[in-house]
Amino acid sequence: MNEQIVARHWLAIIAPKAAPALATSTVLILARIWNANGAQHSIGNAALMTALSLGAAAAGACASIGRAGDPVIAGTAFAASGALAFAGVAGYADGLPLPLLLWSVATAGAYGLAARYWRTDRRERVAYERHVSDRREERAHVERVETIRGTTQIEVARTGAAYAESLAAALTARAALPGFNPVALERAGLPELPASHRDAA
């Protein structure tokens, strides 16, 4: 019932949304640094990146085939294949227009893929919060019922004790009245009094 409420830091909220743009920007920056250090128009470097990209794509295809396929591994392999291809083209090309075009396409694609996972995560989070809220309501209802039941039992016990005290006080007061004769009451057909009152009389 008394669970701690934790407010998320604004960086923790923004970081997942900025991750695709940061990833593609990092690949672009590294590819342009590689371009400036000898990758521009280098057939060997382009062939290496092509081979790595094809290898990652093949690994992704193998990971997604059959019942034992793992979607996480397949997605990671395909993302790596795309990043390697993007880095190879950005490192090989002259100027910035083509790398920037590829960066915008890669960023849009990354956000498109991430949006699907964000929606799934949001649905799961909402379902979990609903479940927790239902459990809280159920427990609160049980607690209210138990509180009412306990209060009722206490009130009943108090009422019984008050009745017993009142009865004892009435019997004591009646026995103290002048001219009280319990034997005369019994002869008149009234209920028999306890022996203690008979002895007191």
Image: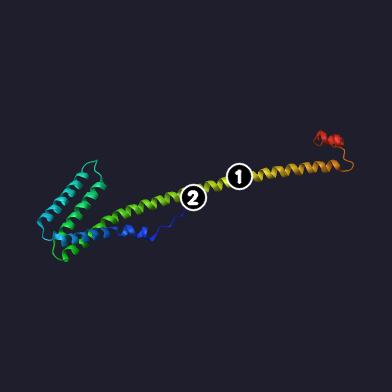
Secondary structure state at the residue bearing disc 1: helix
Q: Position of residue 27 (x, y in %)?
A: 22, 58
The residue depicted at 79 percent of the width and 43 percent of the height is 169
Residue 70 showing in the rendered view: yes
Q: Name the residue under label 1.
A: 150
Left or right: residue 191 versus residue 81 is right
Residue furthest to the left: 43
Q: Residue 96, relative to residue 136: is it above or below?
A: below
The residue depicted at 85 percent of the width and 35 percent of the height is 198
Give the residue type that dot 1 points to.
Gly
Q: Position of residue 23 (x, y in %)?
A: 26, 58
Give the residue type that dot 2 points to.
Glu
Query: Nearest the camera: 70 or 146?
Result: 70
Q: Position of residue 148 (x, y in %)?
A: 59, 47
Query: Where is residue 70, by image quadrant?
Result: top left
Residue furthest to the front: 37
Query: Where is residue 44, by image quadrant?
Result: bottom left
How packed is label 1: few (under 14 Cα within 10 Å), some, or many (20 or more)? few
How packed is label 2: few (under 14 Cα within 10 Å), some, or many (20 or more)? few
Q: Name the residue under label 2.
A: 137
